[in-house]
Amino acid sequence: MAEYVGDNSRTESSDESGPFDEWIPSFCARFGHEYFCQVPSEFIEDDFNMTGLAQEVPHYRKALDLVLDLEAMSDDEGQESEEPVSRSIVEHAAEQLYGLVHARYVLTKPGLQAMAEKFDHKEFGTCPRYYCAGMQMLPCGLTDTLGKLTVRLYCPSCQDLYLPQSSRHLCLEGAFWGTSFPGVFLKHFKELEDYVDRKTKETYQLKVFGFRISDEAPSGERMRWLRQYPKTEEELSELEKCEFQIPEVK
Amino acid sequence: MADVEMVEAHSDTVDGSDSSEYAEFWIDLFLGRKGHEYFCDVDTDYIIDRFNLINLQKTVSKFTQVIQYIVDELDDNALEQMSSARIDQLEHDACKLYGLIHARYIITIKGLQKMLQKYKEADFGRCPRVYCNFQPLLPVGLHDSPGVDCVKLYCPCCEDLYIPKSSRHSSIDGAYFGTSFAGMFLQAFPEMVPKHPVKRYVPKIFGFELHKQAQMARWQELQRLKLEKTLGSKGVNKGYK
């Protein structure tokens, strides 16, 4: 709990610049929150966008007020309710609420634009795979429910999932980006797919003194398929057969 | 026994600062330096044996002096007389030569054993790929001549190459580990080859897979099933999870 207070005091160091610190920008500027984009308050104010979130986040009203910087109102309400909730609990709820709204916002057109800008600046990191040659990655959740799995990074070039390099990103909730984000992003920015298709599909082969290892050895190649792409006519027709199911192996 | 002692001495230098009062061996100082965690200690006997140094003579100037410097047999007087520029050059050459000898040493039986220990402790880092489940990595070079490319890390689980996380490591010359090390290592310790995960990721939108990516994934899975079948018909262990 004390952590959040500590975090706040650190980010609010620029107090002199304005009369008060807005919650959303200060949340996004926090250390380790580089993957978040700023959700405009109009998006959050629209009740339609918040459908169903009241059930998922505790102290929904107070959390919402905190996110939208309407704290004066929440103080009044605090007096009405029987047990006042401590600020750190509301702060935690506000973070969850913001994260879930964020997952919805990044699927909208302005949200995708904001994320594309971060993508271009490599703010989500680059693929650690050598042959992907520093391809930018996209944050991705493996579940849409809170508290299950942390965020993963999807590389559009090798179409694989990686763990964030830095430990400060390892504890971020995956649901704050959602399972659909990389898919929607790829479909929205078609040029990205074209770019990836044009990339060379080089792979690594284990060798000893220049000789490749036999497939029959225990250390022989077993994962070539993962980075394999059809090249010959025969393979391309095979790919066509895979449109809806995997054909039987003859 | 001697090996165990050496390892202990090595870890001591890592913990303590470089400027300890007692005289230390050059190799220990080299290994204790930040960013040199991938290297193992090469036996002095191995370095002194001229047979192991064939064809390395031309890589550095004043070869014999450099060797003496590495194994701490250089005269203190001779060292004192050198200019600081010469000492810097000597140090630089020593690092390079040690790296090249290291590449040869780690594919010998003793070297492989030392690297096995480091691999088990995941000194080379772990695979960042989600489905590889923190598999320890192995260092490999893409070229055997120095100054071409930096060291890469090989994951025995997904059989792919990764760039070291830290820039301290990603700037080490790949020739100091050699192109054959990972292959040699897995040949020597077949029990260290992990089971390969079959699971993979296909991007989804609201639970529906993207058609193009899913189709490609199905084709790749077909290739895997084909391989599995040919291996099965030969009675070879497939090694999938």
Image (cartoon, rainbow, N blue to C red):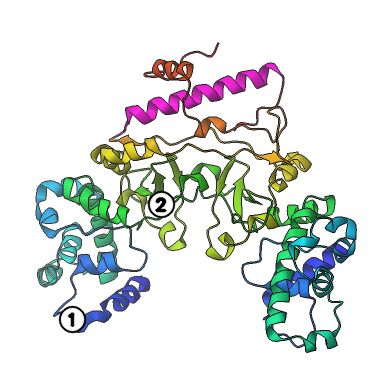
- Residue type at mark 1? Ser
* Quarter where residue B157 is shown: top right
- Residue type at mark 2? Thr
- State the separation of the CA atoms marked 2 and 1: 34 Å
Q: Dot 1: what SS?
A: helix
Residue B184 percent location from the top left of the image: 75, 43
The secondary structure that dominates the magenta segment is helix
Q: Residues within 10 Å of mark 1 (few under 14, many from 20)?
A: few
Residue sitting nearer the eye, A157 or B193: A157
Decide if residue A103 is in sight here. Answer: yes
Q: Residue at x 44, y 28 (%)?
A: B217
Label 2: chain?
A
Residue sitting nearer the eye, B68 or B85: B85
Residue sitting nearer the eye, A71 or B138: B138
Q: Which residues fall within the magenta stretch?
A: B207-235
Q: Residue at x 55, y 25 (%)?
A: B224
Give the residue number, with chain letter if any, for mark 2: A150
Label 1: chain?
A
Q: Dot 2: what SS?
A: loop
Q: Residue at x 38, y 28 (%)?
A: B214
Name the front one of labels 2 and 1: 1
In the rendered image, the quadrant that contains the N terminus of chain A is bottom left
Give the residue number, with chain letter if any, for mark 1: A17
Q: Is residue B166 magenta?
A: no
Residue A132 percent location from the top left of the image: 46, 45
Q: Is residue B217 magenta?
A: yes
Q: Is A53 left or right of B35, judged from the image as shown?
A: left
Q: Is A127 left or right of B21, judged from the image as shown?
A: left
